[in-house]
Amino acid sequence: MKVRGLCLALLLAGPVLAVDSGPLPGEMVTRIGQVAALPADQRQVPGFAGAWRRASAQDKVLARIVALEARIKPCADVRVVDTVQAAPDLIETRPQRIHHALERWTVNACGVIRKYDAWYSFEQSVSRLMVAESGTGDFQAVLDPPYRRLRELAAVRSTEEAGGAVRWLNLPLPADSLPVANANSPAGWSADFVPAGDSAREWTQLVGVQGLPRLKSPGQARALLEGMQQARARRCGVAPAAVEALPADEASSGASLQTYLVCPQVPDTNYAEMAVVKAIEGPDYLYVVQRAWRLPAADAAKVQLDSRKPKLAAEAFLAQVRLCNPAGDTSACPSPFPR
């Protein structure tokens, strides 16, 4: 009875539609209560949601936007222009762990441009989604402090982006990728993805992404990659490989570098590892992305030979990994990683 009264109040307060509680398509809540970034199985809409929400979840939001547009003015041509992660995700820890996320969807409805908020509240088995026209959810914000806080964070992010202090990282993951590790602390953030069927320990391929705090001194990317080479050399008994400078990234604030790591036999295992690692110095983070493979252990020459195709595939993947400045052109980042 309370729920029905609340829904009526929301409808009277402005154009708002709430989805019934229950698991949302594509949610994967970790042990710490965080929803892992889950690549879309199919792109239904452009931008962030098309890359990081399952197709059925994208359809859910779009259906509610179409229904809201029908209340404003009947329109049979509602097209999504863009979707963005409007604010950093928010995690409640008390009284229970709930992960909140806010997206902003821009639509063209018969020639009229409108923006909508899609607020996700992820909680095991009782998640919910609210869709409202941006700027009309004040009543809901009074009732739900997490939504109010997300809107505040969205305003801060918008200011930061307009000032050119924030970057998006384009990360077009392979279609069958699943998250196996997520971390976030003052020391930076990271996530690892493997093909469906692999695990955090038993993987055949891996994509790792990190954001490390930027240092004011120059050469941070080179120092990191050279340090990785030295560590691999000590662990695997191979000579360090070169660190290659890449063409300047217009949206970066420093160097873009890449290196190739090979270990003919990882100690105490029967497999070899190879990885191509790219580091980009942005104004906000040092972004580090690697594409790695495990192969049968062998001598260095044979592993080099066996890894030719994976190395080419890794380089092709990393060629698409770049930064975009949301204050300017973001078209080069069709798959912006959650941040």
Image (cartoon, grey):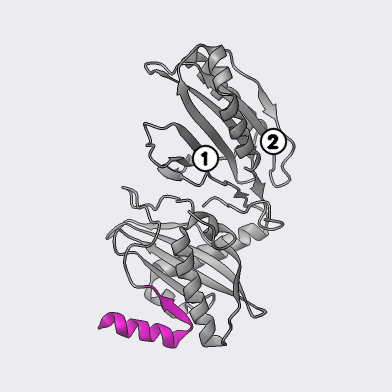
Label 2 or label 1, whichever comes before in sequence order: 1
Image coordinates of residue 64 in percent, x first then y, are 47, 75
Q: Main secondary structure of the magenta part?
A: helix
Is residue 314 shown above or below 229?
A: below
Residue in the foreground of this view, choosing between 19 and 42: 42
Amino acid type of the residue tagged 2 in the rendering: Ala
Task: Identify the image quadrant of residue 275.
Answer: top right
Image coordinates of residue 122 in percent, x first then y, are 36, 60
Is residue 95 shown above or below 113?
A: above
Q: Which residue is mark 2?
A: 255
Q: Residue at x 59, y 28 (%)?
A: 309
Query: In which quadrant is the N terminus drawn?
Result: bottom left
Is residue 252 shown above or below 135?
A: above
- Per the image, label 1 sits on a secondary structure element best described as strand
Rounded to the nearest whole Å, what is the CA distance between mark 2 and mark 1? Answer: 17 Å
Q: Is residue 136 visible?
A: no
Q: Please state which of the two labelled residues, at mark 2 or mark 1, is closer to the viewer.
A: 1
Task: Identify the image quadrant of residue 196.
Answer: top left
* Numbered tag placed on residue 246 in the rendering: none
Q: Is residue 80 left or right of residue 184?
A: right
Residues in magenta, as a range: 1-19
Task: Identify the image quadrant of residue 255.
Answer: top right
Amino acid type of the residue tagged 1 in the rendering: Val
In reply to whether residue 18 is colored magenta, the answer given is yes
| Mark 1 Cα-neighbour bin, 10 Å: few <14, some 14–19, many ≥20 | many
Image coordinates of residue 91 in percent, x first then y, are 39, 56
Q: Which residue is mark 1?
A: 209
Count of residue discs: 2
